[in-house]
Image (cartoon, rainbow, N blue to C red):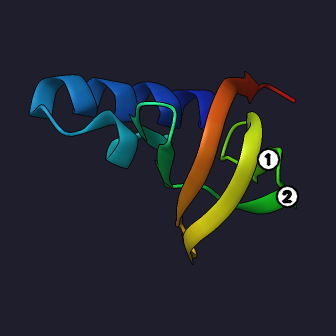
Amino acid sequence: MAKKWTHRLRKWMTNKMELPADVMMDLPRVTMVGQLHIYIENHRGLLVFTDSELRLLLTQGQLLVRGRSFVIKTILPEELLLEGKIEEIHYLNE
């Protein structure tokens, strides 16, 4: 119950104070440059990495990226830059 109330409060604050939703609501920020690069901020950790698949843990669920020739160019505690041929991006609500 408290978690639901907290979520509503954060959403209200985001709207009223015009703050970025990714910061206030602990959401990931995903930035793509064509199909060549994907920059993901505010993730909770790397779960799977191969040359054709990347799976990241999010606060709510997971992010799955599929493609070819993947190379992690930068990895920091909450940021990741992936390079390769990006074909699919899915949010998994598990």
| Mark 2 secondary-structure assignment | strand
Please give the name of the residue rendered at 60% of the width and 27% of the height, measured from the top-left corner. 4
Q: Residues within 10 Å of mark 1 (few under 14, many from 20)?
A: many
- Indicate the position of residue 18 as horizontal and vertical percent values: 12, 31
The one of 61 and 24 positioned closer to us in this rendering: 61
Q: Residues within 10 Å of mark 2 (few under 14, many from 20)?
A: few
Please give the name of the residue rendered at 48% of the width and 46% of the height, measured from the top-left corner. 37
Which residue is disc 2 drawn over? 47
Residue 80 in which image quadrant: bottom right
| Relative horizontal placement of residue 3, taking residue 32 as reference (left or right) | right
- Mark 2: which amino acid? Leu
- Indicate the position of residue 26 as horizontal and vertical percent values: 48, 46
| Mark 1 secondary-structure assignment | strand
Image quadrant where one finds the C terminus: top right
- Indicate the position of residue 67 as horizontal and vertical percent values: 74, 35
Mark 2 or mark 1, earlier in chain: 2
Against 91, residue 74 (above or below) is: below
The one of 68 and 65 positioned closer to us in this rendering: 68
Which residue is disc 1 drawn over? 55
Q: Is residue 63 visible?
A: no
Q: Is residue 66 visible?
A: yes
Rounded to the nearest angstrom, the CA distance separating label 2 from label 1 is 5 Å
Image quadrant where one finds the N terminus: top right
Residue 47 in which image quadrant: bottom right
Against 61, residue 26 (above or below) is: below
Q: How many marks?
A: 2
The one of 86 and 61 positioned closer to us in this rendering: 86
Q: Are marks 2 and 1 in contact (CB under 8 Å)?
A: yes
- Mark 1: which amino acid? Arg
Please give the name of the residue rendered at 63% of the width and 34% of the height, measured from the top-left corner. 86
